[in-house]
């Protein structure tokens, strides 16, 4: 099973089709002939031709066995499965199947790729017809519901045999392990929007991408949209036209992502756990920091330290980070942030942007965060990222009409007020707070990071 990963992050897997099991599948036409034989045998019996029933059934069975035995096989087939090197959770991943035929006879039938048991797919089965020396290709989309490791189980072919009496079902040994990561496809979409200058569609304010850093690089003519604070008035007076300063991006700064994997992150929003929403959103932050030449690290914690990835730069670090988070799960235990951030403080001293992904729903939780995370606000830029459930906004938008909706309205109002008071406490402790809904979290995180960079706060 040779496997090749090309420069586009795709995996091409070739299989020499080894038949694990071959099975005879009579067709509808065969059963029609069986049913047709009943009245024929009855009529023949009435006229005294008792031998006709035996002859008819034996001849039909003999034809079935002969066509099955001399029917087509898969020895001249080559099977290839093309897909991304890793799959994205809760996204439509494209799977491309290719069959190459090197035999001497035309083949037709049905092919079905056996996907992992928990996945859902759009049309993993299709009819095929392939001539000698030709290639048959089809695609389908696969949606993994959870991160982690899974595997393709096999591929089944039902080859049409002569006379249409039987199909030969062949199980090919095409098992293949696959890893499901956070939504990599969203990262590719971000890169595409960046290349096309359409980042505003992803919630990224384009103006924040210009002029990051505080280290002087060069002078240039003023263009519409430039910040007047960048105007070099001495150069403007000398040249008689408005001149602005260009600043290059400051590199080798550090961003550390701290992810709570305790019970608070098990809560679901629209059927998706908060931890999964966090892991999907941090991909854009990692990509933005690496693209800016900064170091990125990770601390995943629960009751104990789960993962620690020291901050480093370079695109290789993105792969290291993804491998560290793809199988993280939220556990029904109380996290120990004091232990986690003491661990981090002992291993990282340099001023950094620290982003703590956890759930703060009330003042008691805010107090715990201040005790464990607040000390970092003195020497670092501390940001707490909290996911807000959009259902609260929808409930508060509508006037209550009965007792049940009034109860929901009062509960949503109470919880929203608790979160607001908790955010005020955190800000008083010099901890930045980002309270975003799931669809806005990634864009808000990148905007905050770019704002920190542009102001030279690191």
Image (cartoon, grey):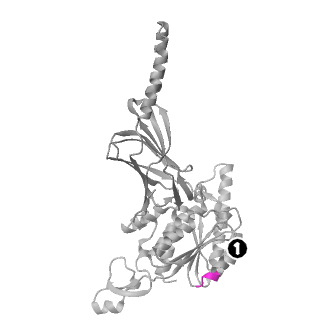
Residue 94, image x and y in percent?
44, 54
Is residue 66 visible in the rendered image? The answer is yes
Q: Position of residue 288 (x, y in %)?
A: 46, 73
Q: Residue 438 or 128: which is nearer the viewer?
A: 128
**Residue 373 seen:** no
Residue bounds of the magenta highlight: 345-349
Question: For residue 353, which quarter of the picture?
Answer: bottom right
Residue 455 is a magenta residue: no
Mark 1 closeness class: few <14, some 14–19, many ≥20 residues within 10 Å: some
On screen, 20 above or below 407?
above
332 with respect to 103 (left or right): right
Q: Secondary structure under badge 1?
A: helix
Placement of 71 over or under 137, stated as above or below: above
Q: Which residue corresponds to mark 1?
A: 368
Q: Residue at x 55, y 54 (%)?
A: 145
Return the x and y of residue 136 as percentages of the image width and height. Answer: 36, 46
In reply to whether residue 346 is colored magenta, the answer given is: yes
Residue found 45% across the figure and 51% down from its top: 141
Q: How many numbered marks have been drawn onto this rendered protein structure?
A: 1
Q: Main secondary structure of the magenta part?
A: helix
Return the x and y of residue 25 as percentages of the image width and height.
48, 34
Residue closest to the eye, 170 or 420: 170
Query: Looking at the picture, does residue 294 appear above or below residue 167?
Result: below
Q: Residue furthest left?
A: 240
């Amino acid at each position: 099973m040779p496997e090749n990963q090309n420069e586009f992050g795709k995996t091409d897997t070739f299989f020499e089709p080894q038949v694990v099991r071959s099975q005879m599948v009579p067709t509808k036409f065969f059963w029609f002939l069986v049913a047709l034989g009943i009245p024929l045998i009855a009529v023949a019996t009435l006229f005294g031709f008792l031998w006709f029933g035996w002859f008819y059934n034996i001849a039909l069975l003999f034809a079935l066995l002969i066509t099955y035995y001399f029917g087509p096989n898969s020895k001249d087939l080559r099977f290839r499965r093309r897909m991304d090197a890793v799959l994205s959770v809760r996204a439509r991943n494209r799977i491309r199947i290719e069959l190459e035929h090197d035999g001497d006879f035309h083949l037709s039938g049905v092919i079905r790729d056996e996907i992992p048991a928990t996945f859902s797919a759009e049309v993993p089965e299709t009819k095929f017809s392939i001539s000698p020396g030709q290639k048959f290709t089809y695609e389908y989309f696969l949606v993994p519901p959870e991160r982690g490791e899974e595997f393709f189980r096999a591929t089944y072919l039902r080859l049409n045999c002569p006379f249409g009496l039987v199909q030969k079902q062949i199980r090919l040994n095409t098992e293949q392990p696959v890893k499901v990561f956070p939504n990599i496809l969203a990262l590719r979409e971000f890169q595409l929007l960046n290349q096309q200058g359409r980042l505003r569609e992803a919630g990224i304010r384009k103006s924040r991408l210009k002029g990051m850093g505080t280290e002087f690089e060069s002078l240039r003519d003023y263009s519409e949209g430039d910040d007047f604070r960048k105007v070099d008035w001495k150069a403007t007076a000398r040249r008689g036209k408005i001149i602005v300063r260009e600043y290059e991006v400051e590199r080798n700064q550090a961003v550390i992502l701290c992810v709570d994997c305790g019970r608070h992150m098990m809560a679901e929003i629209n059927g998706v756990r908060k931890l999964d929403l966090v892991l999907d959103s941090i991909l854009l932050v990692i990509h933005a920091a690496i693209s800016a030449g900064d170091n990125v690290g990770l601390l995943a914690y629960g009751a104990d330290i789960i993962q620690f990835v020291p901050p480093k730069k370079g695109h290789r670090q993105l792969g290291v980070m993804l491998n560290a988070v793809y199988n993280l799960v939220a556990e029904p235990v109380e996290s120990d942030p004091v232990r986690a951030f003491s661990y981090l403080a002992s291993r990282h001293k340099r001023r950094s942007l620290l982003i703590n992904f956890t759930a703060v729903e009330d003042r008691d939780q805010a107090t715990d965060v201040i005790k464990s995370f607040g000390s970092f606000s003195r020497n670092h830029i501390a940001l707490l990222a909290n996911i807000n459930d959009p259902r609260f906004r929808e409930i508060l938008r509508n006037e209550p009409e009965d007792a049940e909706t009034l109860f929901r309205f009062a509960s949503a109002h109470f919880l929203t007020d608790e979160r607001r008071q908790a955010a005020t406490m955190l800000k008083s402790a010099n901890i930045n707070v980002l309270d975003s809904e799931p669809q806005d979290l990634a864009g808000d995180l990148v905007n905050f990071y770019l704002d920190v960079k542009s102001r030279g706060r690191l």
